[in-house]
Image: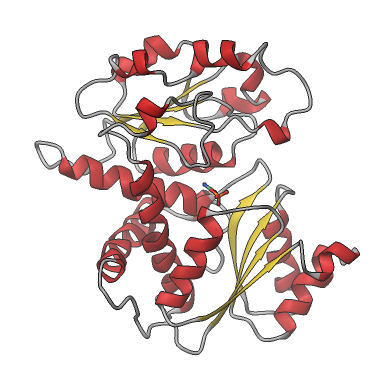
Amino acid sequence: MHHLLSAADLDRAQIGQILDLAEEMALVQSRPVKKLPALRGRTVVNLFFEDSTRTRSSFELAGKWLSADVINISAKGSSVSKGESLRDTVLTVAAMGVDALVIRHHASGAPWQVSQWFAELGIDARVLNAGDGTHEHPTQALLDAFAMRRHFRSLPGDQDSFAGRTVAIVGDITHSRVARSNVILLTTLGAQVVVVAPPTLLPSGVGSWPIRVSSDLDQVLPEVDVVMMLRVQRERMSGGYFPTPREYTIGYGLTRDRLCALRPGAAICHPGPMNRGLEISADAADAASSLILDQVSAGVAVRMSVLYRLLGGAE
Ligand code: CP
C-alpha cells in the first residue's frame, strides 16, 4: 500500500493488520501521556477543501500522537481562495518536503488525481483520501469496521468475524462516500450488506454492487447485526429527493418506535455529523446500543494505524 485512496486498495489480510495495529494504538489513546516516537521527523499535511470536524481533528491527533509534525491547510485562509488550482496547491505543499498529504475534496477522484501528479513528477509523498466528493472515505470504513469488530467481540460467544453478519446502510446512498467505502470494506471482510433507501436516493449503478437493495426499512431492521444510518446530505441536493423531511423520517428514520424492531445485540452506527430528528432520533443516537462515539474514538486509533503503516516503514 503506497497510498490509501479507496477501500478497494485493501485486501482482507491488510484490513485485519490495520485493525489489529489500531487496537495497539487505542492503548496509547487511553494513556495519560499520549505519545509514541514512531513518526518523529515525518511531516503530515492535512489539506481540507471541505469542512470537517471528526476526520481533520482525528488525523491531526493521530499524527501528533505518533510524533509527526502536522500542519492543517484549509481552502478558507489559503491561496485556494485566491484561485490557486489543486495541482499548484499540492505541488507547492509537496515542494516543502512533506511525507504525507491527507486530502478532503469536494471533487470525486481528487486524491487519485494528486497521486497521479506525484507519480508523474517522481514525488514520493503518500496520499490519503479523507473523503472525496460522493466517491469514497476509506478511513471512515476502517474505523466503522474497528467499532463493529469490538462490538461483535463484546457479544456472548466472542465471535469477532464479519462472516454471517448483516449490516444495513440506510438513507442517502446516492451522495454517500461512506456508503461506497463501507460496501467495499464490509464485503471484503465477508459481511452481507443491504442498502435501504428511497429509489430517489439510490445511485444508478447500485444494481452492480455486491449487496442487497431494499426500500423497506421495517422489513430489514429485524434481521441486521448493525444498522448504519447515513446523513441526509442536503448540501449536495439540488432537487426534491423526498417530499418533506417528515415523510423521510416516517419512511427511513431510525425513530424511537423502530428501535423495538432491532434484535438484542444489534448495534447502531452513524458516521456523523447527524441530523437528529431527521434520519436518526435522539433515542437511537443516545441508545446503549449506539456505537456513534465509539466510531469517533476509533477514528484516532485507526488513523494512527494507517499513518504508521504508510510512513513507519511497515510496507
Ligand atoms: N464522518 C466524517 O467524515 O465526519 P467529518 O465530516 O466531521 O469529518
Left or right, 290 with reference to 249? left
Identify the colour scheme used: secondary structure
Left or right, 252 with reference to 287? right
Q: Residue 159 in the image: x percent, y percent?
A: 16, 41
Split into 4 quadrants, where in the image is the C terminus?
A: bottom left
Residue 203 falls in which quadrant of the image?
top right
Q: In this view of the protein, can residue 161 be seen by the observer?
A: yes
Residue at (24% x, 42% y) in the render:
151
Residue at (56% x, 65% y) in the render:
3
Q: How many marks?
A: 0
Left or right, 76 with reference to 234? right
| Camera-nearest residue between 241 and 138 | 241
Q: Residue 125 in the image: x percent, y percent?
A: 62, 77
Q: Residue 114 in the image: x percent, y percent?
A: 72, 64
Residue at (32% x, 35% y) in the render:
290
Residue at (74% x, 49% y) in the render:
107
Q: Is residue 173 above or below residue 63?
A: above
Q: Is residue 229 above or below residue 50?
A: above
Residue 49 falls in which quadrant of the image?
bottom right
